[in-house]
Image: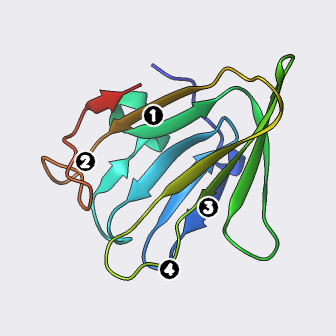
Amino acid sequence: MRVSVPLEDYVMIGDTYTAGLVSRRGSIDWLCLPRFDSGACFAALLGRPEQGHWSLSPAATGWYRGDSLVLETSFSCVEGEVRVIDCMPTRNRWPDVMRRVEGVRGRVPMAAASCHASTTAASCPGCGRTAGDCRS
C-alpha cells in the first residue's frame, strides 16, 4: 500500500475537455480520458498505485509556466538536474498527455512507470490499454 499524497501536493494539467492531477513526486495520479465524465485511466489518487498512475522520479519541485496549465517540475540529485514539462494540449479529436524530460545539468538516472486503470471499462478510454497494464 502506498503512502497517501496530500491533496494540496497536486497541481492540475488540462486541455479544456479533461484534466489530470500531478503530484509533487512527479506522478500523474488522476486522469479521466477522453473527457471529465469518462472513466479514470489513472486513479492512484484514491490510494494504490495499481489503480493507475504515470510516474517519473526522483524528488521534485514544480510550478506552472506563466499564465497556463503547463507544469514544469525540476528533479535534482547529486548527479545533476532534469526538468519535466507536463501538459495536455488543446485537442482536435483525441486527448494527449505530454511529458517531456529535459536535461538541465549533469547526468540524472531516471525511472519511468505507467500503470493504467479503468474505473468503468475493461480498457482505458481513449488509449485502449487494459486495466492493470503496468509498464516500467
Image quadrant in which the C terminus is located: top left
Q: Earlier in the sequence, mark 1 or mark 2?
A: 1
Q: Are marks 3 and 1 in contact (CB under 8 Å)?
A: no
| Mark 2 residue crowding within 10 angstroms, few (<14) / some (14–19) / many (20+) | many
Q: For the residue labelled by badge 3, is the local secondary structure a helix, a strand or a loop? A: strand
The residue under label 3 is which amino acid type? Met
- Left/right placement of residue 10 relative to residue 33 reads right
Which residue in the structure is indicated by mark 2? Answer: 118
Residue at image location 12% in from the left, 47% down from the top: 122
Q: Secondary structure at mark 2?
A: loop
Real-space CA distance between mark 3 and mark 2, rounded to the nearest whole angstrom: 20 Å
Q: Relative to 89, is 61 on the left or the right? A: right
Q: Position of residue 57 (x, y in %)?
A: 64, 28
Label whose residue precedes the other's in the sequence (2 or 4): 4
Q: What residue would you read off at disc 1?
A: 47
**Which residue is depicted at the point 63% across and 25% down?**
110
Mark 4 or 1: in front is 4
